[in-house]
Structure formats: C-alpha cells, structure tokens
C-alpha cells in the first residue's frame, strides 16, 4: 500500500485504508483459496474496493483516488515476525493512494501474513502452516532460520569485536 505522501495525515489514512481493504478482501475471498483463486477474486473486485477506499477517504476529507492492481514488485529482505523473507521480485496486490509517493506498507495476502498492529512478533501458527503447505517444509524452515545480524563497524572496533 503506497500512501499519497509521507505526511502524518496521509500515512494515517494509508493504515486506515489498509485495514478496510484487508477486511473487504477477507470477506470476499473467504478462507482456503489458492493463489490463483485469490488473484481472480482481487481482479474481479478491484473496482469495487477502489470505490470503497475512495468513499472512506472522502468521509475523512481526503479527495485523492485509490488504484488497486496485481503486479510484480521488487522487495528488500524483510523480517516478518519470526520469519525472514529474502529480497526478490514478488507477486503483489499494489494499492496506490493518490500520487503514491509515500512510504509503503506491505503484508502477504497469500498466505495471509498480515499484522494489524506492531505488537505481534511471531507469525500466527495458522499462517505458518499455510506458508509451509505453499513452499514446503524445508523452505519454510529456511525462512525461519534466516537471521540478519546488523553490526556497526565503529562500535565493533570500540568494543574489540572481530
């Protein structure tokens, strides 16, 4: 989801529209769909959901539009709870609000790995099972074992770390 801009107001609207659209997608798509069925559902409802988002934003005093499209996007490595997804090109449902020049927010719709708040630190077990069915047990374990260590050269030098 790309916000119109990085202003606090646009970022707040982005998160509200995110919640609105996640609920709409879950209601329309239901549970247990495969990726192809989910993409088909999203494509067939995108105009409806764009209008839903625009109506909501208008009720908040925002006059820019919303665009929903299925695309391929490049993402950096992403820690998501206790999983780390490698950098790469992923199939996406891209939602652009207004000019789409603000910071983005992303989650996986298939399998659904979306956190609604920042308090979650572990991927829900149901989503983990769905991910394992999709990519296989070995690849899922590799996602869980991927750890990125962030180190600072000067701090390491001061602390005498190699």
Image (tube, rainbow, N blue to C red):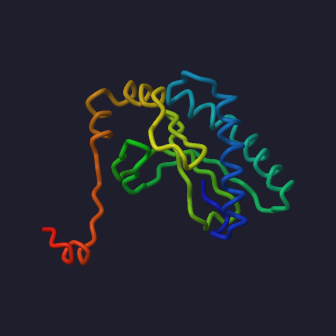
- Give the image location of residue 99, x and y in percent: 67, 66
Side (left or right) of 106 relative to 131:
right
**Total number of numbered discs in the rendering:** 0
- Give the image location of residue 144, x and y in percent: 32, 39
Residue 48, quarter of picture: top right
Q: What residue is rendered at 27% in x and 38% in y? A: 142
Q: What residue is rendered at 78% in x and 44% in y? A: 52
Question: Does residue 90 lie above or below 110 as drawn?
Answer: below
Question: Does residue 110 lie above or below 50 as drawn?
Answer: above
Residue furthest out toward the front: 159
Q: What residue is rendered at 29% in x and 49% in y? A: 147
Residue 41, quarter of picture: top right
Question: Does residue 57 lie above or below 153 as drawn?
Answer: above
Residue furthest out toward the top: 32
Side (left or right) of 23 relative to 146:
right
- Give the image location of residue 13, x and y in percent: 72, 57
Report the front residue among 46 and 134: 134
Q: What residue is rendered at 37% in x and 54% in y? A: 77
């Amino acid at each position: 989801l790309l916000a119109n801009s990085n202003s606090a107001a646009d970022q707040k609207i982005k998160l509200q529209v995110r919640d609105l659209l996640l609920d709409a997608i879950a209601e329309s798509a239901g549970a247990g769909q495969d990726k192809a069925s989910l993409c088909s559902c999203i494509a067939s409802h995108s105009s409806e959901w764009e209008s839903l988002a625009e109506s909501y934003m208008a009720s908040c005093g925002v006059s820019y539009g919303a665009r929903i499209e299925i695309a391929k996007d490049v993402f950096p490595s992403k820690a998501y709870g206790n999983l780390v997804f490698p950098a790469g090109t992923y199939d996406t449902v891209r939602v652009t609000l207004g000019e789409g020049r603000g910071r983005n927010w992303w989650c996986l719709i298939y399998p659904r790995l979306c956190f609604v708040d920042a308090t979650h630190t572990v991927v829900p077990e149901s989503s983990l099972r769905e991910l394992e069915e999709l990519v296989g047990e070995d690849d899922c374990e590799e996602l869980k074992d991927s750890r990125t260590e962030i180190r600072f050269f000067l701090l390491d030098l001061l602390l005498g770390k190699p």
